[in-house]
Image: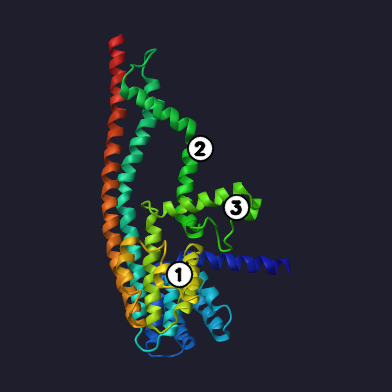
Amino acid sequence: MISNKLKSKFKEALFHWKLKADFKKPQQIDFIKQLNSYLVSDIGMVEALTSTREQYAATYGKKHVIVQITDNLIKASSTGLGFNNLMAKYFDPIIAVGFELAKQVSGDKSAVLNIVDLVEQEAKLKRNLVTSLAMPGFVFCLGIGAQYVVGGYILPMVPGKTLPDSPEVNFSLSVYSILSSYWPVALFFFCLVFWMFAQGQANWMPNGSFGKNAKRIEDYIGVNSFSLHITKWLSNFRKRLDTVWPFSIYREFWSIRLLRLLGYLKLADVEDIEALKVIGNFSPPYIQYFTKQMIRGTGIGSEKKDYFGKELVSDAQMIRLRRYFENVDNETFARGLVEVSKNAEIDLKLQNGKYITKFQMTGFFLGIILVFLGLGGVLDALAGYQNNL
């Protein structure tokens, strides 16, 4: 029995590793495109999945992870049990909603491909962001490294009892001293920033709660003035963080996603509340916070201006969006959501371009200055030694 459990755990771990390695976003996009090509013929989901499975099995073999994924989806779709859970487990949230849209729409499936295009454009924008900042970031780190090496290793090797009291020498010694003494703080800060980009932004909500269960500090230490103050501070800090680049990119991306996905679902005649639930089911807790607010506002019949996209959609996009809040039919509103999301995508590219240029110039400038200061410190030390001979 123990060996069977170990074997089962091993198979599960192997499948999870294959899922991460061989079913990344590009493969997910190809999968949904392939599935959509069969759904265009208005065949059932199970039949479309079966055809997709056969095609992947013929190309990659029956043991490929995508074939295993499709087998699991076919089984869940046939029984009606756990299909959405599998979608959330296997796919990027946007692609999962595209999958749901493919189920809802009959006939023209172009909206599904438009959603896939959104994923591809996001990936392209992120790649451009990383590649644009990589070189100036490297130059800046090179400058810091040069200062550390000069202050900690090169200057102490210069012969003589004392080093010259020059700004370059003192600066290099200070940089080495600070980095040597406070490297744990720097490491913690780096890990915190990395966590924010990897997990923190997805799970930290604007009301100060965290995770799928929306836990607050009060849930751990009780309700008191201290815990309430911490929750309020966390809430305000998260809202502030959403306005600071590059952290604001996450909110901007998701506002575009929400508007685009909701627009396409509404064009497929999905009711507002049901469409928001679909998006929320495949979204991180951060977005679920907003979809729940919008579901609540829709359910009690509030005016859209009082709840729709509040704190998520930027002020610039809200100006465009407001004209669709009154005196428009369902289709016009849905098309308006799609149009505004496309405008927001263009604005985001321009905004990122502006910040990227600033960071590039700053990174290159500071990095080069630090390298030259380190070189100046070495030359000053050598000159001082020569004068003392």
**10 Å neighbourhood of mark 1: few (<14), some, or many (≥20)?**
many
Q: Is residue 298 among the parts visible in the rendering?
A: yes
Chosen colour scheme: rainbow
Name the N-terminal-most of marks 1 and 2. Answer: 1
Residue at the spot x=48%, y=60% of the render? 202
Q: Quadrant of the N terminus?
A: bottom right
Nearer to us of marks 3 and 2 is 3
Nearer to us of marks 3 and 1 is 3
Judging by the rendered image, the residue that carries numbered circle 3 is: 217
Residue at the spot x=67%, y=65% of the render? 6
Judging by the rendered image, the residue that carries numbered circle 2 is: 184
Mark 3 and mark 1 in contact? Answer it, CB < 8 Å. Answer: no
Q: Is residue 65 among the parts visible in the rendering?
A: no
| Residue 55 place in picture, x, y as percent | 42, 82
Judging by the rendered image, the residue that carries numbered circle 1 is: 93
| Mark 2: secondary structure | helix
The three-letter amino acid code for the residue at tag 3 is: Ile
Does 341 sit above or below residue 136? below
The three-letter amino acid code for the residue at tag 2 is: Pro
